[in-house]
Amino acid sequence: MNFEFQNPTRIVFGAGNLSRLGELTGEYGRKALLVTGGGSVKRNGIFDRAVESLKAAGISYVECDGIEPNPRIASVARGAEIVERESCDVIVALGGGSVMDASKVISAAALYDGDPWDMIHHGQENVYVPTEALPVITVPTLAATGSESNCGAVITKENDKVKSFIQIPLLYPKTALVDPELTVSVPQDQTAYGVCDLITHVTEAYFNGIDTTPVQDRFAEGVILTAMEWGPKAIADGTDLTARAQVQWAALVALNGWLQAGTDAPYPVHMMEHTLSGHHDVTHAAGLSVINPAWMRFAARSNTAKFVQFAERVFGLKADSPEDLNCALAGIDRFETFLRSIGCPTRFSELGIGDELFETYAKDTLKIVSDGNGNLPGRPSMSVEDMVGIFRSAL
Ligand code: NZQ
Ligand code: ZN
């Protein structure tokens, strides 16, 4: 292993912390752009409580509402314009991953004269790397992406049917105010998708990383086991604050860089899913739960020992040998059964998607990321035919 790790985001975690929003925002600015989604925070009272806290600390605010799930680059541009027009000096992201991702890109776009799409990897020759950004405070209302304390963001350009990412240290939020109380109103399906998303963040690093990362493996298995134990409790009873807190912490640690450190893992399942979402606007984790088990069955044939380890340690199965493919596949079956048990789809047909564009997804994914041989990085790397085969197996 050979790596550097630094995550500068301050994490303030615990039920009831929303009342500290004003105080925490005031450390970075006096006039906030308050970014929200399609209205959930207004319906459940979170917005009013956030505003009350900002006002009490003497922070004024301007709103940028209406950020879509799978946030659009046009919304980013709209937010950046408001920041410039209103001279905001800090950004507060009050919502799910979509709101947080849009806010991060707004923070850089507001200080950039060009088109914010230049910053998103979409196959262009030169990706613009911003060098300055406004401070961002994240307040997640949904446990899923880990966006609250990482430096990535995923944005969609609707007309081009492209959804892709930016990931640079500049975009680490200053503070993540993580209050599990804010997630009690998340409906069952979104709660389940969050569990699926966080587990997939872990499995990507676990299965695509280099050999011999025993500490990371144990962290990863611990997060997966925790999500599988506490996720169903949060789904069964959304008001179970203990379960909500465990799921939210699991989601945060699943993608704040710590589990990934030293693994050098690419994220091929995410790359393929983003293409799918770009074409069909599907919920991120609904796409993941279809593609991930299918990808696992493909990858288990060449990285068998790691899938055997997963089957044994996560599902308590017993292998005949470290290369026991049947055991590896049985572990994947168990994982898929878990996803189904929490209500996640595992077939394209459940998303209303046929096989017409499978080759297009594969080729479009390679436009965003590919290795020197024109394949999608992963373990193993994948050709267009490999990806189409994976999609077909999940039809
Ligand atoms: O828009 P509102 O009205 O707020 O409703 C949202 C939305 O409909 C609702 N919701 C959020 N908090 C709620 C709530 N409903 C009731 N009560 C609450 N407390 O949930 C719906 C989904 O919200 P969204 O933000 O889209 O979900 P999520 O957090 O799963 O974020 C998904 C986005 O993040 C990207 C995905 O690709 C997708 O665009 N990702 C970002 C990552 C990152 N930055 O690190 C990594 C991930 O792998 C992922 O790609
Ligand atoms: Zn994800």
Image (cartoon, helix red, strand yellow):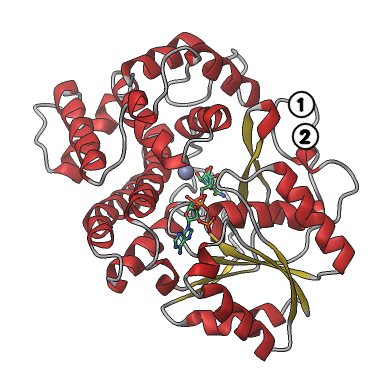
Q: How many marks?
A: 2
Q: Residue 113: x percent and y percent?
A: 91, 48
Q: Quadrant of the C terminus?
A: top left
Residue 383 in view, yes or no: no
* Residue 159 horizontal side relative to residue 273, left or right: right
Label 2 belongs to which residue?
127
Label 1 belongs to which residue?
124
* Residue 174 horizontal side relative to residue 226, left or right: right
**Which residue is drawn at the image coordinates 63% and 80% (left, top)?**
51
Tag 1: amino acid: Gln
> Can you say whether 74 is above or below 375 in the image?
below
Q: Residue 262: x percent and y percent?
A: 49, 45
* Residue 64 horizontal side relative to residue 19, left or right: right
Q: CA distance from mark 1 to mark 2?
A: 6 Å
Q: Which element is circle 1 on?
A: loop
The answer to which image quadrant residue 110 occupies is bottom right
Q: Does the residue at mark 1 contact the one at mark 2 (Cβ under 8 Å)?
A: yes
**Which residue is drawn at the image coordinates 57% and 73% (left, top)?**
47
Residue 179 in view, yes or no: yes
